Structure formats: structure tokens, C-alpha cells
Image: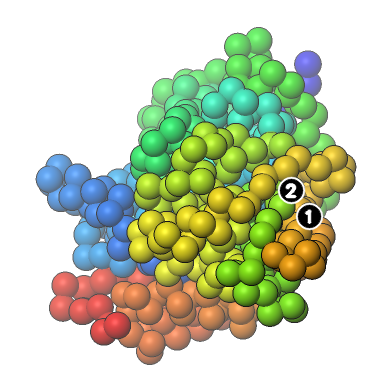
Amino acid sequence: MEPITRTIVHFSHALNSTDLGAEVVDRTRYLLLDYLGVAIGGSLTDSSQSVYRMLARSGSSGPCSAIATAIKAAPESAALANGTSAHSIELDDTHQAGSIHPGVVIFSTAIALSEANPEIGFDEFAAAVVAGYEVATRLGMAVQPKSHYELGFHPTSTCGVFGAAVTAAKLLRLTEEQMLSAAGIAGSMAAGSLEFLADGSWTKRLHPGLAAHSGILAAKLAAAGFRGPSTILEGRDGFLTGYSRDPKPGLVVRDLGKSFEILRTSVKPHACCRYIQAPIDGLLELAGEHDIDPEQVARVEVAVLEAGWPLVCEPRERKYAPLNAVDAQFSVPFGAAIALSNRKAGLDQFTEENFSSPQLRSLMSKVVMTKDTRIEKNFPAEWPTVVSVRLKNGTQFEKHIRFPKGDPENPLTWQELSAKFQSLASRIFPASRCEQISNSVRGLNWSARLGDIWKLTARPDSLSAPAN
């Protein structure tokens, strides 16, 4: 078999800023701003607060910031905290074909290490981020999302740790052989169970933080001379055969260097699983176009991709009666009901008040989840849906969504992304600070001082949250 691990590591090690075109650099800035907004907003969740308490009790200290807090910690601890907060509100970026959230792992890794070493400029930072996206997303594609999910794995964590190891190795300036060992070591850290779906617990939120933490640790071990297997991806007992019943090893290196997967990464406008984004888009459009009164709805049909079915349609009893925010974020009936009733599906809609509302529960009971061969043809490159609403008077409306809002084919503009950032960051920072962060990220160039931006995203003890 082709030496896949060596090939992807050789490419990643050699990649530098001169290989990145203007579009790739702009996309890196764009996704960085999205990441920062989501991490700032996510810092307020109960799950994030638990991580911060753990760091405080452990006496952790170091040069790196837990975003939107006054906590200072070692790089791997800061990456753990930031990866967890940025994944806790289900608004982080998604690579469709790999069914993976790369940014929450890769940026958590890169920010921590660049803060630990002020000599790292945006050129080195961007190359390390793009390399990490390449590795994580290509592995997501290679294990085949549907097959990977069927085994109970979460690719953001399992595939993400390899991307984190490569990003960390680049920023720690390891040799190619050391990077190869870092990838090999990361293979023994690839974990992430989907069992959180059974009871709405918080472990999924922890997955990218753990991947970033482990990636940094793997690179540091390799730097100190620890050796990892050089065939960790393609080997008999390697990652691809161990984590998928139907792996496609060739996807790891196919067309490597001809384009970049960071350009194929989407952002989320709605605060829930990516598999529910297209249905929400379709129902929002129908509600707006036909001024649908939720009280007059008799039936709602939502076609769901088979790969996403175990995540957002099962277990059925919890999808129709979510007990907490995690349940709601992974519930097609809740997403459909909130779209029709509130005509928005942001962070403020995924609340206990809504998922316990008798009116919403009644509307959720009218949602029928279906499988439809029409939407499977181009998966995983496309995540479409077909939704329909039938009213009590017999009138029926239907909408086919091919590319959900936020996809590269249907992107949020910079202005829309900035508005998303503002809506999240303003939960912690005043408007002037939010604007300063946004302008600084959008204006990043090779000579920019990254540390100045990270200082803006930290929260001094004296800074109080803005009034509601």
C-alpha cells in the first residue's frame, strides 16, 4: 500500500505561506473570526465553566489564555478549554465531505502555541492551520462519515487529533521525521464516542478540546525523541482499518496540493447540528414566503440524510421530547418546530423555556422524519434536504434545499459573518472591543502581531459583561 502517512506528513511539513493563494489566506482569516466568536459565546456554557473550574483547581498556569476569561494556562490546557468552549454551542465550522468540525480543533491548537511563542507570525500560523485542516478533513473523508458514525465515533475528535498534531508540529518547528512520529503518537490518542446522544451529556463538547490537547502533547513527545509508528494511517492495525468498515485510503492523498479543503469548509448560521441546518433553512423560507401560522400546521415532513439519521433522529423518544440543550441541538423535530414558530434558530432559541414549551411540543409531534433517495446522490459533498408543510386546510408547500446557508456555494458574506461574531462576542465584550477584534482579524497580514489579537479576546478581571 502507498505510504499514506509519509505522503501527507511530507506535504504538511513542506507547506508554507508562499503556497497559499489570496483566497486561502482570506478564508483562514474568515474562519478564524468565526472560531473566535463561537469560542467567546461558548465560554458562558455550563460545560465550559466546568473546564475552567478544573483548570483553577489543578493550579494550571502558563502563557496562554482561555478565551473570554482571565485564566492563563499551559498551551495544551488552554487548547483543551478553548476547544471545548468553541464546540459547546454548535455554531462552529463544518467540512461537509468529512462530516467534521476542523476549526474548533485546529485553531485551538494554533492559537495556544502562537501565544506561547510570540515569534510566530501570521504567515507561519496560516500555513500550520491550513495543513491541519488538510489532514483532519481528508481523514474524515477517508474513514467515510456514515461508516465512521456506525461504529460510534465522532470524527471531529478521532480525525481532528491528527490535524492538531500536524499543526502543533509545524508551530513547534519539528523536523519531518519528528512530525511523522507526532502523527504516529496521535493515532493512540484518537478517541471520541457518540454515546452522549443517549442522555444529552456534554462529552461531545469536550472532544475537540481533547483532540487539540492531545495533538500538542503528541508533538511535544515527538520533539523530545519519542517515536510513533510511521504507518499509523495505512497499517494493518492503523487508523483507517480500525475506525471504518469501508475506508477509502486514497482520499487522504488524492489531488493533494491542487486545492485546499479549508475552501470547502462551511460556517453555521443556526445553533445546532449541521445535519439540521438545511431543514431549518427550508422551513424558514416556507414560513417567510407563505406567512405560515404554526397553529394551522397539520404535518411537517423533513428528509434527513442517512449518515445523520443516528445523530438527529435517534433515539426517537428524546428527539420528540428533548430534556436539555444537547438533546435539542440534535433533534430534527425541535429544529423544525423552532424554525416555524420563532422563524429563527440561533443560540437564544435553544433554551429550556423552548424545549419544554407545550406549544412547541405540540408542533414537534407533527414533524415526520423521512429518508429520501433524492438527497443521497451527492452526499457527502452536498448535504441537501426536502421539507414540506401541510396546513389544516389541506394546502401544502414544499422546498428543496441543495446548499444550506453557510456552505461555500451559499456562503455568509464577510458582513454576515461579522454580524454573527458580534452577536456572540457581545455577550462578553462591549461593542467597541468586538469591532476591534473583528477589524484586527480581517486586516491580518504576514507582519501582524498575533499576540495583540489574543490579548483582545482575553477577559481581564475588571471587565464586566455588557448589560442585557
Residue at position x 38%, y 87% in the image: 431
Q: Residues within 10 Å of mark 1 (few under 14, many from 20)?
A: many
- The CA distance from mark 1 to mark 2 is 5 Å
Residue 188 appears in the figure: yes
Q: Circle 1 sits on which residue? A: 386
Q: Position of residue 107 (x, y in %)?
A: 49, 55
Q: Circle 2 sits on which residue? A: 303
Q: Which mark is residue 119?
A: none
Query: Which amino acid lies under the numbered mark 2 shown in the image of this protein?
Result: Ala
Q: Residues within 10 Å of mark 2 (few under 14, many from 20)?
A: many
Count of labels shown?
A: 2
Q: Secondary structure at mark 1?
A: strand
Q: Position of residue 103 (x, y in %)?
A: 54, 54
Q: Position of residue 351 (x, y in %)?
A: 39, 62
Give the vertical position of 101 relative to 221 (above or below): below
Residue at position x 74%, y 68% in the image: 393
Residue at position x 87%, y 45% in the image: 374
Whether the residues at callouts 1 and 2 have beta carbons within 8 Å, the answer is yes
The C terminus lies in which quarter of the figure? bottom left
Looking at the image, is mark 1 or mark 2 earlier in the sequence?
2
Give the vertical position of 229 relative to 152 (above or below): above
The N terminus lies in which quarter of the figure? top right
Query: Which amino acid lies under the numbered mark 1 shown in the image of this protein?
Result: Val
